[in-house]
Image (spheres, rainbow, N blue to C red):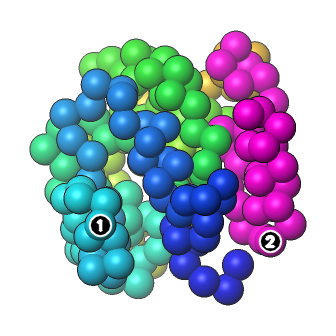
């Protein structure tokens, strides 16, 4: 997009506000933002934390969220996913158990690491990945107990899988705008 996607406008408001609104009523104890530019997000009125380990990409952000969160289970969502489905998120939260470290949907067999729930048990494996500069989010999943949700399972909540769509191009933004207008 050539700019911070969190502030790209869709249907009259920044993408991040769509994500926050769609995930606001899940019964969570806290909502935090991981950002290295807190002044730009101050208007949202949420607690914010800078990356503990700068320049480590999304995996570094997940690590920071897990370390800073007060809760043992942390829902991680990317800022550019305007069709997040609150019913699916509730279902995902219901899947957390003592013997599960991660709940992650899969699209075409690929885990959605920025639309997943992580337990604090993931902190040490993520720290090891970051120390080795291995920044691919799902690279540590093989060390964890993962509960995958495949299409047949999440289709009841989102048959088209739109909730996993992140907006990376002006064309994707235009399509999202069209979809939002069509649903009104």
Q: Residue at x 50, y 28 (%)?
A: 86
Q: Does 182 sit left or right of 68 as displayed?
A: right
Asked whether residue 176 is drawn in magenta, I would say: yes
Q: Position of residue 129 (x, y in %)?
A: 41, 66
Q: Is residue 2 above or below residue 74?
A: below
Q: Does 136 sit left or right of 108 as displayed?
A: left
Could you say whether the residue bearing mark 1 is in a helix, strand or loop?
Answer: helix
Q: Earlier in the sequence, mark 2 or mark 1?
A: 1
Residue nearest the viewer, comparing 81 with 69: 81
Residue 109 sits in quarter: top right
Q: Is residue 137 above or below residue 99?
A: below
Q: Residue at x 60, y 70 (%)?
A: 8
Question: What number of labels is visible?
Answer: 2
Q: Residue at x 43, y 37 (%)?
A: 23
Q: CA distance from mark 2 to mark 1?
A: 25 Å
Q: Is residue 132 above or below residue 29?
A: below
Quadrant (top left, top right, bottom left, bottom right) of the C terminus: top right
Per the rendered image, the range of residues in magenta is 155-184
Q: Position of residue 173 (x, y in %)?
A: 76, 62
Q: Does 70 sit left or right of 129 as displayed?
A: left
Mark 1, residue position: 43
Q: Position of residue 39 (x, y in %)?
A: 27, 80
Mark 2, residue position: 170
Q: Residue at x 31, y 60 (%)?
A: 44
Could you say whether the residue bearing mark 2 is in a helix, strand or loop?
Answer: helix
């Amino acid at each position: 997009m050539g700019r911070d996607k969190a502030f790209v406008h869709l249907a009259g408001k920044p993408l991040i506000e769509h994500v926050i609104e769609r995930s606001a009523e899940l019964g969570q104890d806290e909502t935090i933002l991981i950002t290295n530019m807190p002044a730009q997000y101050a208007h949202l009125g949420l607690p914010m934390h800078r990356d503990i380990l700068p320049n480590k990409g999304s995996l570094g952000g997940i690590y920071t969220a897990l370390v800073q969160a007060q809760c043992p289970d942390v829902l991680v969502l990317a800022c550019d996913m305007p069709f997040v489905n609150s019913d699916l998120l509730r279902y995902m939260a219901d899947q957390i158990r003592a013997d599960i470290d991660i709940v992650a949907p899969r699209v075409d067999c690929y885990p959605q690491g920025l639309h997943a729930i992580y337990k604090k048990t993931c902190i040490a494996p993520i720290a090891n990945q970051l120390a080795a500069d291995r920044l691919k989010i799902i690279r540590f999943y093989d060390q964890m107990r993962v509960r995958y949700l495949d299409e047949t399972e999440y289709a009841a909540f989102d048959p088209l899988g739109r909730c996993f769509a992140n907006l990376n191009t002006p064309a994707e933004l235009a399509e999202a705008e069209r979809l939002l207008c069509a649903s009104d």
